[in-house]
Amino acid sequence: MSDKINLLVIDDDDINIFIIKKIVEKTGYEAQMVAKTNGQLAIDYLKELKDARLPFPQLILIDINMPVLNGWEFLEAYEKLSIENDIDMYMLSSSVYENDIEKAKTYKTVKGFISKPLSIERLIELFEGKNIEPIQS
């Protein structure tokens, strides 16, 4: 049972990152959130963790439309990293296109598709799925 969650958010919108950070704080869970503004920065970050043998995020939230490396390209690059850890990944997008939702299902690493905005309740569900305990007050 882990008592802290490592969360990686990949989103090019500073406002979305700020909102997710505030939502994390309101869940009552202890979480370390790292944000990367495109898929390439996220891949570089994961490579650094792998090379340094540091803990990987347990949960990754991925926006679809981003510069440099979009969400789909991130997933393609991620699969080439051969990371053995069990990381729950969710596409977090404002896209309402059914083909994006269907495409998310084709990746074995993607557990689901969440439409923006992310809610506190939905994030708590994700944390509970990783067996994270809320902070005792």
Image (tube, rainbow, N blue to C red):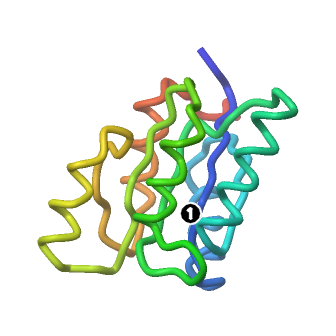
Amino acid identity at mark 1:
Ile
In this view of the protein, which residue sits in the foreground, 105 or 115? 105
**Looking at this rendering, what residue extends furthest in the front direction?**
80
Look at the picture and state if 72 lies above or below 79. Answer: below
Look at the picture and state if 96 lies above or below 60. Answer: below
Q: Residue 115: x, y in percent? A: 30, 70
Q: Label 1 neighbourhood size at 10 Å, few (<14), some (14-19), many (20+)?
A: some
- At x 63%, y 67%, the residue is 22
Q: Report which quarter residue 108 is drawn in.
A: top left
Secondary structure at numbered mark 1? helix
- At x 59%, y 14%, the residue is 1
Q: Residue 5: x, y in percent? A: 64, 37
Quadrant of image for the C terminus: top right
In this view of the protein, which residue sits in the foreground, 66 or 26? 66
- At x 66%, y 59%, the residue is 42
- At x 70%, y 54%, the residue is 33
**Looking at this rendering, what residue extends furthest in the right direction?**
52
Q: Residue 6: x, y in percent? A: 67, 41
Q: Which residue is mark 1?
A: 23
Disc tally is: 1
Q: Is residue 75 left or right of residue 83?
A: left
Q: Is residue 31 left or right of residue 13?
A: right
**Looking at this rendering, what residue extends furthest in the top direction?**
1
In this view of the protein, which residue sits in the foreground, 57 or 2? 57
